[in-house]
Amino acid sequence: MEPTHIEHIGIAVKNLDESVKFYSEVLGLTCYKIEEVAEQKVKTAFFKVGQTKIELLESTEPDGPVAKFIEKKGEGIHHIAFAVKDIDRALEDAQGKGVRLIDEKPRKGAEGLDIAFLHPKSTLGVLTELCEDKNK
Ligand code: CMX
């Protein structure tokens, strides 16, 4: 699979505006984009730290994956996303090694990336995302 870097870290928050303040006013990072991903029932805010991004996630629906996560575990790290060169191959590879896939095929995520999730029950409890930037 050979990930090239951590593309982003997803952090589940209850209130996007309040959480953006912490990252901008305390850490001094710039929020360069707010984007709603309707399919995932989330509103996201992005910051860059080197080549890695921080993605804050607020649920837009009470039954969305982020709302369910916060209900069970509270606010905090929701997922880690690895950049890969060939996401189709990476998914095949993971499945071949017995990993349970959430997405059998890549789909479009925030920032126009092709993304797919691996189930946290087969990734040591950490929801793991694979991303490929096909615009590069
Ligand atoms: N990290 C670790 N464990 C998680 C988790 C997460 N982010 N989300 C859910 N789980 C765990 C739950 O705690 C639960 O564990 P237990 O059975 O031990 O209690 C188990 O997974 C099942 O959770 P659930 O609440 O019953 O939820 P579902 O099975 O309905 O869905 C999951 C879980 C991971 C398949 C679903 O949340 C999913 O498809 N996630 C991927 C999509 C997503 O998270 N999108 C939001 C971000 C999108 C973006 O970045 O743009």
Image (tube, rainbow, N blue to C red):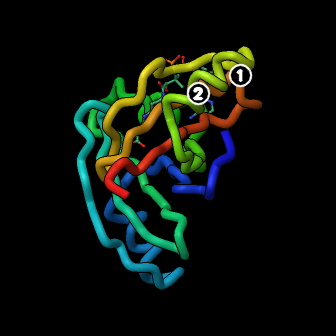
- x then y, percent, for residue 77: 60, 49
Question: From the image, which quarter does the C terminus lie in?
Answer: bottom left
**Is residue 80 shown above or below 71?**
below
State left or right for residue 44 relative to residue 98: left
Instruction: Look at the numbered disc 2 and give the secondary structure of its residue.
Output: strand
Residue under pointer 2: 118
Mark 1: amino acid: Ser
Residue positioned 38% across, 79% down in the render: 30
60 or 88, which is in the foreground? 88
Coordinates of residue 36 in the picture (x, y in percent): 24, 47
Image side of residue 47 versus residue 125, left or right: left
In the image, residue 58 lies at what x, y percent? 37, 47
The one nearer the camera, 85 or 66, is: 85
> In the figure, 127 relative to 91: above or below?
below
On screen, residue 50 versus residue 45, left or right, reads: right
Between 92 and 78, the residue placed more toward the observer is: 92
User: In which quadrant of this rendering is ligand 1 seen?
Assistant: top right
| Measured Cα–Cα span from mark 2 to mark 1 | 8 Å
68 shown above or below 12: above
